[in-house]
Image (spheres, grey):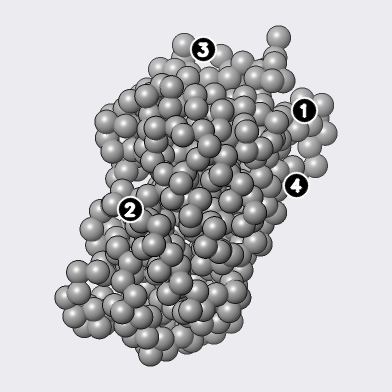
Amino acid sequence: MGLRILLINPNRMRSPPVIPIGLEYLTAPLEKQGYDVRIVDLCFSSSPIEDLENYLRKEKFDIVGFSIRNIDSCIYFNNEYYLPEFKKLIDCVKPHKIPIILGGAGFSAMPNEILEYLQADYGIIGPGERAFPKFLEAWQADQLENKIFNGWNYGLDDDLIQLRAKRVDYQNYYSNEGIIGFSTHAGCQNQCPYCIEAGTRVSFRKIPNILKEIEHLVNLGYTHFHLCDSEFNSDLNYSIDFCNALAEKSFPLKWTLYMKPFPYNEKLFRVLHESNAYLITLSVDSDKITQTLNNYSYDDLAKIIELCNKYKIEVAIDLLTGYPYETIDSTIEILKFFQKNRPKTVGISFYYRIYKNTSLENSIKNDPALQKKLTRAYMEKENFLEPIFFSQYEQDDLEEIIAGDQLFRIAGVEAGVNYQL
């Protein structure tokens, strides 16, 4: 008989609640290897510690996995730090003498620091579909070389067809304004200097298998989807092929996605429209050095907005502004640009969450002047685990430039996300 594996979703953010598809995506490859897999979803639990303890008393498991989706809420205003609550849940498992493994996007941000803080046994960074079975094989054979297993080396299991909504109560999410997610690929080759995923290996799912996953969910009655990829258009040809294939199926659905300003062409927007994409969230930087690193300009932004208007797709801008050494002039320039080339909305973030192993972290470490612009004191052995942000501006500075234009909103001041528009 195979191992008995318990996968736990400790993430309880509810504005909106996010279905733990990372855990769902793990069940198929684990069951393919003959393992017995259970999921405990604590998102809507009123007593998560009590519920987890009750579950652990009822059944025996060989290993427990926690999905760490976020370290904190990532936005400065009303920031929530999640790790202390996660630690309480992990401490519930400790008396049962079961090995604990961590994964998820949040864990991948700072794996060594999180593993130490939560006092877990092992971790997997990056995608886990191929990596988790490989880890378990090495673990059972006592052949692990490190506590942290690198999933980027293995990528996605693109042969799998993910028939989801079996172990997670989707209706609970749906009735609380959650949107059904799906994924086409993992990794990102962008070079954003503040991002934990920049320059990671990209691996793609097979398009026919994604369509079968979506069809399964549509047949269950779900018709509103959000793409969970960091940025949809990592590979322009793949993106167009996916949209063409989705359009040909004529599923009764609508969907929304994140995109970067490059690469693109008019055909992409045409097939997005034909596939019933109704909203694009476009990630934009006002810092021209970052724009250059990612191969786009103001001309590209203007063209994308024009094409979205032509093909009746709403566009919401996620704008980051005030990067180290950037001047207020570039912030004013980009806000004036969007006043002239108007999308549906512009969400402005001017506090940068700092993560280890990024270019932003190096800039902060090497410049005492930047350290004075942090939201808490910079420590000599700073590990950046507890939320710390860089900002050149005050909220009043941005509000003065915005001058009451309802196009703009400051991210985090009001609850909500762009894909709920």
Measured from the top left, where is residue 407 in percent x and y? 24, 69
The label on residue 137 is 1
The crowding category of the residue bearing disc 4, from other C-alpha atoms within 10 Å (few below 14, some 14 to 19, many at least 20), is some
Task: Nearest to the eye among marks 3 and 2: give it.
Answer: 2
The type of residue carrying mark 2 is Val
N-term mark: 4 or 2: 4
Assess disc 2: are there few (<14), some (14-19) or many (≥20) residues with their C-alpha within 10 Å of its C-alpha. some
Q: Which residue is mark 4?
A: 153
Cβ atoms at labels 3 and 2 below 8 Å apart:
no
Kind of element beneath mark 4: helix
In the image, is 44 to the left or to the right of 26? left
Q: Is residue 156 above or below residue 98?
A: below
Cβ atoms under marks 4 and 2 closer than 8 Å: no
Residue that badge 3 annotates:
59
**In the image shown, does 61 or 242 lie closer to the viewer?**
242
Kindly identify the residue that appears in the image at 54 percent across and 58 percent down. 267
Residue 363: x percent and y percent? Answer: 56, 79
Q: How far apart are the two marked residues, 3 and 4, measured between alpha carbons?
A: 33 Å
Nearer mark to the viewer, of 4 and 2: 2
The mark found on residue 417 in the picture is 2
